Structure formats: structure tokens, C-alpha cells
Image (cartoon, coloured by chain):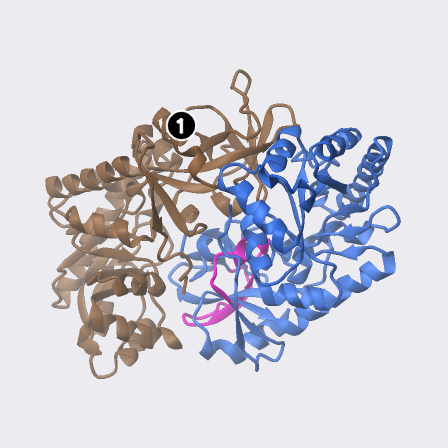
Chain colours: A brown, B blue
């Protein structure tokens, strides 16, 4: 990770900390590598924009070959639709109450919109929201493959597809999220297998009621390595654009593939074996645990052992260099997704640290 | 907490979830109660705006008698200065590198600005930043009272005050943060005692070098109950404006004093003893632990056992009512401060749920 520190040393006079720094060359490599994986396996790549919430990055993903984007909530979809993205999959069991129904109807006018459902109540509410044009909305049935989060049992996918069709909505396929694969390499492999089995059952369930699964959509950065094409038509990775320490630990990326870090300044150093950084829970989000910490400094063994809102407690193991007050260090987050939405903009540079652009985090907020 | 659910039932058609809802009558009571405590004990109240980041709420605090505000970083101070707040204490060991020095100089032109320091390097950098008007900047020396975060040893406060004076800055006093009082009632009481001892030593240390401590500034919502006037001239509580589950557990507030909750919709219910809410880690921040959960539904024993980014896993204990898909429930955060900055605006109502205003979270972001 030393190139992070090199880039930072070059930039340091020009940024106020804490700030998220993107190495655009590393990010671009990540984007293109994922497209190659898609081509090799014969599935489309539909990146999840929850990770970056940035129109410029979404455009680069589409330019590299992504078929469209995945969004996690209506607000995110609206931001990208307004920026001209015309193929959006809202991979979430949307409940279109209040203003949300009307917002979905409007979205479906400006973009090819697919939304997730896992229950009949949501199907009815979506059909009501679409008024006399229910066929503008494509439905992808969510099934559970072991994450025990949202998603119907795979064998019931056909019933939901049929319920959607009866209301005039257009069922186009199934999706699932292998979220139980985020613990180890073995768990990733098992989760990918569970995912394939659940999708296979779900596709059969659709076929049983006469619905063709044109879309068979799978997650996710940590399971891509074990995901094969054939049945699966698309993947929805998000984190791969930046990666993070969690993906490094899982073996889902190398340290050199990490494309985002948070530049932080040492502001206090009175406690032995510790310095205080100006990146706390409001900058890094509280992702991690007491055991493995809340993020690490690239190229060192120093780990944030504790976070207050504006203070990061950087623990310095024996033998580790103690950065002096005023030093700026590159913090690599454990989990990158909840970091980005804390900031208004990315500081975008490359591994040499010479270029500097600022890209807005366009869909920051917009959580509903 | 049933008034939360009552207010929500009235509002539910008019808001998109997840959304932070403020009960303005409860909040106003909290603001006024804290002022009365200040009057009883003879110290000023200088609320920390990190909790709400909202100009309207800051104005209400000042109108109720606050002497000024406390900010946690330069960006926060800038937002409130631009809104006309003219007495701001940046209670943080600022390192004014790069653009930050210039920003502090400009802030000190439009407001009476006090900043924290705990080291000589920062003093020199601040003096450099102030150019030929160092006397526009007031310095409050941070000392540690046991939180082992930032802050010099109390006996060294005088050395730092003298260093500031030598550079033409204006040392006006000392401050500390009793952050080690956030575990139990006893810990709160001990931390308040530690705080008083540290401030007493620090004031003496200033006197020894001929500096009068005009400001002797103490935290913090959980320790106010055990804080006495006399030596201490001001307190900097933040959370009291909304309170949260952590403060309830500590005995620092009652459930009826909680003024903010996050309205969330049940979007999926396939797993026994669990439903999924549309408030995950991006809405609630990951404040809590596996043991005590990540927030609770008001008026029930249901607790968020796990968070993904857009999914809250609400565990339903035996005997607890299972809310149906589409229900909107009031989630009370464990720690309110990192929740607010996830949203663009507050939905402001009262305990009857009949009024509805929207107040911007003005200083959302602005972390550097």
C-alpha cells in the first residue's frame, strides 16, 4: 500500500483532512478487471452504485461495459436517473408508501426501471402506484439464498411473479444476495454455491408458472470469484470499485487494488503507544470491532483501536513508527461503503499524487 | 415512549422513510431544562452543535440562554458563523495545515473564535496562520482528565498558555472532556470528579505563569448531573437536545425526554422472529454491539440485532407484536450524534404529530 502514502505526500498541502482520496488509476483498473471477469464468464456487470454514489464513477463503469446500474433505494436511483442513466435496477424490496409510489412511477418514465419485491403486499402497492401503466415497471423477485435478510423462499418465486403479472406489472426474473459469504474464503465459496442453488430453484419456479427468467441476478464483490455464468445473467458488485480492508482480509482483493483511503492528520500525541487522528466515527463510520479495529494506516501495522465522533485513536504496536503531530496518514477503511456518504466530494488523484480533481458524492444522503 | 408511536401514526402518510423525526416540544423542554441547570449551578451553557448540525436548533439554544456554541471542526464552525453565530468555541485540538489556517483566520474575523490546543506545534501553526493579527484568536488549552484521548497533562496547561501568549495569541482558559464517564452512573460521577480535579490543576498551572483562566469549560451530557459551578464557568453538552438510548441506559435522561427517532418501514418479513426495516447502517450508523443491538423500537422490546447498509434486522423477542410489512415504526438510536449527518433534513413535528416542518441539517458533511 505504499503508493497510497506516496500519493498522499504529494497531495498533502492541497487537501483539508479528513478527506476521501481516490487513486483513479487503481480504480479504473478495478472497473476494467471486473468487466473482463464478466466477459470470461458470460454474465453482464451491473455495478451497485451504493458504494460510490458518484455519477462520474457510474459513467466510467458504463463506459467500460456495464449494462446499467444497481441502486439501493429510490433516492439513489433518482440521482442517477436525473444524470441520464437509463437502465436502473433497484435491488431492494421496495415498499412504495406515501410519496414513494409516485416517485417510482416518475422514475419509470425516464429510465428502464426494475425493482425488487419479495411479498404480495409490495406488488399490490407498486401496481397501484403505477396507475394505468403498470407495464412500465419490471419486477425482479428477490429470493433468499441463506443470508436470512430479505427475499422469499426460492420455490415461491413463481407465485410472486404470477401475482405481479396479474396486476399488469412485468416480471422479468429473480435476484439474490449471498451476504452470508462475508466471513472467510470458504464461506465465500459456499455462499456462491448457495446462491447458484437458490437461483436455480427460483428460475424453475418461474418456469412452472410460465414466466421466463430473462434476468438472473447475483451479488457481490466477495463472491464473484466463485460465480459462474450459464444460469446467472448478471452480477451486481459494488465494493470492487474501491475495495477495502474487509475484502483484503477475505482474499477478495490485494492491497494494491485498494483505490480509496481517508487522509487524516495526527492532531494530538500525549498518550503512549497512541496518537489521535482527526478521522473519527463521523468520517469512517463505526465499521469493525474492538478485536480488529476500525481501519488501518496503509503500509503500517497501526490500527484505529477506538473511534469517537471526531477522534480516531490510532494504536501503535511495538516497533511501529510514531507519526508526529501534523503528519497526514492514509487510513484504509474496513468497509468502504458507509464512509463515502459522510463526505461532499472525493479528492481524485493517481498513484503519483500529481493530478487533483474533485468529484461530488452526488447521491450522498438520499436515503429514502 | 408511546408518544413517539402516536406522533408517527399521525405523520406516516406524509414522510418517506427512513427519516429522522424530531418532537419539537420534547426538544424545547430539553433545551430549557439544561439552561435551568446552568442557572442553578452558576455556569454558562455552550451547547455542542455536533449533535444537531442545525442552525434553527442552535438559534433556539441561544434564545433560551446559551452564551454561544461549541463546534467540533472548522467546517461546522464555518456553517454556523455564516448563519450569524458570533461566539464559537472550536473545542478540538486543531491542526491548521494547508487551507485550514486561512479558514481559521477568516472565521476569527466574523466571530469571537476560541480554539482548543494541546501542543506547541499547533500553537505555532495557529500563530503563523493569524499573520499580523494573532490577538484575534483566543486559545483554550485542552487538558486530559482520564479519557486518554486528546489534552495535555493538566499541570502543563500553563506552559502551553505561555507559549500561546508569546506568539501573540490570547490564552483565555482551559477545557477538558470526561469521555470516560460513558459506561455507568458510577462512572459518570467519577468522571465528573476527575474532570473537576483536572480543571483545578490546570487553572492553577495557568495562574502560576500569570494567566487568568477566564474560561473553565467542562463536558458533557452524561456528566452534567454531577457537575458543579464555582471553578467551572461553562458546560458543553450536545446530546441533551435529543438524548438517545445510551443516555437512557446511563440514567442521564428518561425515555420521555428522547426527542428524535428514525421512522422506518418494515419491508420484508420472511424470517421467523425477525422483520427487516429500511433503516440500516447508512441511516442509523453502526452504534452499538451484538450484545445490546443497534437501536430499539420505541415502546417495545424489539431491538435491531444487525445492520446491513439499507437493511435493519429487527429481532422480535417472544411475546412481542410482529409489525406487518408496510408498518412504520419509530427507531430510537443508541447514539444520536452520528445519525443526524446521514440525512439532509429533519422532519419536525410535536407529540401530537399534527404539525410538520422540515429543517435542514445545515452542517451535514463539512468534516474537515
Q: Main secondary structure of the magenta part?
A: loop
Occupied quadrant, residue A206 = bottom left
Residue A284 screen position, x and y as percent = 48, 43
Q: Classify B137 as above or below A7.
A: below
A204 lies above or below B119:
below
- Of B293 and A337, nearer the camera is A337
Residue at the location (45% across, 23% down)?
Answer: A300
Parent chain of label 1: A
Q: Residues within 10 Å of mark 1 (few under 14, many from 20)?
A: many
- Where does residue A157 sit, x and y in percent of width and height? 23, 63
Q: Is residue A119 in view from this perspective?
A: yes
Residue drawn where x is 63% and y is 31% of the image:
B124
Q: Which residues are magenta?
A: B316-345
Q: For residue A193, which quarter of the picture?
A: top left
Residue farthest along the right direction in this orientation: B230
* Residue that badge 1 annotates: A5
Amino acid at each position: 500500500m505504499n503508493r497510497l502514502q506516496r500519493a498522499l505526500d504529494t497531495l498533502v498541502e492541497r487537501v483539508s483532512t479528513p478527506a476521501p482520496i481516490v487513486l483513479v488509476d487503481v480504480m479504473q483498473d478495478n472497473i476494467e478487471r471486473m468487466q473482463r471477469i464478466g466477459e470470461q464468464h458470460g454474465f453482464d456487470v451491473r455495478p451497485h452504485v451504493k458504494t460510490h454514489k458518484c455519477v462520474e464513477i457510474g459513467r466510467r463503469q458504463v463506459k467500460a461495459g456495464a449494462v446499467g446500474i444497481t441502486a439501493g433505494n429510490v433516492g439513489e436511483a433518482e440521482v442517477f436517473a436525473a444524470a441520464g442513466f437509463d437502465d436502473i435496477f433497484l435491488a431492494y424490496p421496495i415498499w412504495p408508501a406515501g410519496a414513494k409510489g409516485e416517485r417510482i412511477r416518475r422514475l419509470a418514465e425516464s429510465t428502464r426501471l426494475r425493482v425488487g419485491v419479495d411479498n404480495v403486499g409490495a406488488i399490490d402497492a407498486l401496481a397501484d402506484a403505477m396507475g394505468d401503466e403498470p407495464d412500465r415497471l419490471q419486477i425482479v423477485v428477490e429470493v433468499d439464498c441463506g443470508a436470512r435478510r430479505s427475499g422469499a423462499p426460492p420455490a415461491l418465486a413463481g407465485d410472486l411473479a404470477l401475482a405481479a403479472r396479474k396486476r399488469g406489472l412485468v416480471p422479468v426474473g429473480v435476484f439474490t444476495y449471498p451476504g452470508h459469504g462475508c466471513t472467510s474464503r470458504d464461506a465465500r465459496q459456499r455462499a456462491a454455491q448457495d446462491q447458484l442453488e437458490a437461483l436455480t430453484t427460483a428460475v424453475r419456479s418461474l418456469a412452472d408458472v410460465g414466466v421466463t427468467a430473462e434476468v438472473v441476478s447475483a451479488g457481490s464483490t466477495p463472491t464473484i470469484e466463485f460465480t459462474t455464468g450459464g444460469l446467472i445473467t448478471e452480477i451486481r458488485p459494488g465494493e470492487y470499485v474501491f475495495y477495502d480492508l474487509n475484502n483484503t482480509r477475505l482474499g477478495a482483493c490485494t492491497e494494491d487494488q485498494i483505490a480509496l483511503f481517508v487522509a487524516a492528520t495526527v492532531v494530538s500525541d500525549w498518550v503512549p503507544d497512541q496518537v489521535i487522528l482527526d478521522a473519527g466515527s463521523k468520517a469512517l463510520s463505526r465499521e469493525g470491532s474492538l478485536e480488529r479495529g476500525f481501519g488501518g494506516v496503509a503500509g503500517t501495522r497501526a490500527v484505529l483501536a477506538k473511534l469517537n465522533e471526531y477522534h480516531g485513536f490510532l494504536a501503535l504496536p511495538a516497533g511501529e513508527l510514531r507519526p508526529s503531530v501534523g503528519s497526514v496518514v492514509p487510513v484504509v477503511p474496513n468497509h468502504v461503503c458507509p464512509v463515502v456518504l459522510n463526505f461532499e466530494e472525493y479528492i481524485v488523484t493517481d498513484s503519483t499524487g500529481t493530478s487533483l480533481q474533485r468529484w461530488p458524492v452526488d447521491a450522498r444522503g438520499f436515503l429514502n
